[in-house]
Amino acid sequence: MAGVGAFPVDVSGRGRARREPVAAPHVKALFDIPVAAFELAGPGDESTLAPPEAAAVAAAGPRRRGEFAAGRQCAHAALASWGMAPAPLLARHDRAPAWPAGVFGSITHTENYALAVVARPLDAGRRAGGGAEEDRVGTAVGVGVDAERTGRLSPDLYPVVFTAAERSWLGRTTAARRAEAATAAFSAKEAFYKAQHPWTGSWVGFADVEARPASGALELVPASSLSVLHHWSWPVAVRWTASADLVLVGVTVHRARRSPRTRRG
Ligand SMILES: CC(C)(COP(=O)(O)OP(=O)(O)OC[C@H]1O[C@@H](n2cnc3c(N)ncnc32)[C@H](O)[C@@H]1OP(=O)(O)O)[C@@H](O)C(=O)NCCC(=O)NCCS
């Protein structure tokens, strides 16, 4: 099992601290529709938050304020790259970012690293120029991204976050690759959650969806009869990339042919 390629930037957070997000072209390959992707290694800069954004985390501790700022900086850079006018990016009641009309995206942060991806399907569909690519863009209604430090997921937690089938294939993975594979599978489920939740408004638990190896990568399939899973076209492809100690996972969710076309605000 392998990710989708090399990871070109220093994401350790130990190098020269960057206060500005940078474009992350290697992340675009994690999605099957066009996205803008920006990342920031190092702490975020709280002074860049718009007043309503700063107010939303005013009561939080410095670590939370810093990661929130880093995620917002990346998200604003991604929105600007699609030509969107600057505006505060607040959180919905469920903590998901309240993306402006016409776009959807996802934010992740982990120790000293933040990443945001934003898709603008209308523009992307026009650019696709018709045919299968335009169809693919047209059925996509969510993206999810997740970053985890490899090995942060302790094996003690495997029974909590993995199904029996997942533990079985992880058990057959070589010891050298197991921590990375487990991190990717865990992140894939969190990325799926972030992609699906703004559309369905529904909880999906770790036992409801499972990751399995597929063509040298991973894919997600339903593992329970939860009705909200009928919204999606399955399997959901999982793409990931890894550096020495960081795994980045992206998923794109596509409506099933007969899925309700509702989006929860
Ligand atoms: C919501 C959740 C996925 C976030 O993941 P995490 O690893 O804890 O944190 P990350 O740093 O990667 O992501 C946090 C960001 O996710 C986004 N987010 C939070 N809740 C969200 C939601 N309901 N929908 C979409 N995005 C959400 C936010 O942008 C948040 O950052 P911000 O608050 O600074 O804006 C996780 O906390 C959770 O609740 N998981 C349980 C459900 C689950 O994963 N099920 C898996 C089976 S499919």
Image (cartoon, rainbow, N blue to C red):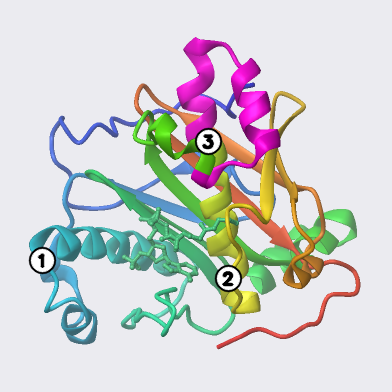
Residue 45 vertical placement versus 216 (above, below): below
Rendered location of residue 253, percent (x, y): 69, 60
Cα gap from disc 1 to disc 2, whole angstroms: 27 Å
Q: Secondary structure at mark 2?
A: loop
Q: Is residue 187 visible?
A: no
Q: Secondary structure at mark 3?
A: helix
Q: Earlier in the sequence, mark 3 or mark 2?
A: 3
Locate residue 173 relative to residue 57 in the image: left or right. Answer: right
The residue range painted magenta reads 160-183
Q: Nearer the viewer, residue 58 or 88?
A: 58
- Could you say which quadrant of the image residue 13 lies in? top left
Any atom of ligand 1 within 8 Å of the CB at mark 2? yes
| Magenta highlight on residue 193 | no
- State the count of labels: 3
- For the C terminus, the quadrant is bottom right
Rendered location of residue 254, percent (x, y): 75, 62
Any atom of ligand 1 within 8 Å of the CB at mark 1? no
Q: Which residue appears at 82% of the width and 59% of the height?
A: 233
- The kind of secondary structure the magenta stretch mainly shows is helix
Q: Secondary structure at mark 1?
A: loop
Look at mark 2 in the image and give the residue it sits on.
203
- Could you say which quadrant of the image residue 174 lies in? top right
Q: Which residue appears at 58% of the width and 60% of the height?
A: 205
3 or 2: mark nearer the eye: 2
Look at mark 1 in the image and give the residue it sits on.
61
Q: Is residue 242 visible?
A: yes
Look at mark 3 in the image and give the residue it sits on.
184
* Label 2, residues with CA under 10 Å away: few <14, some 14-19, many ≥20: few
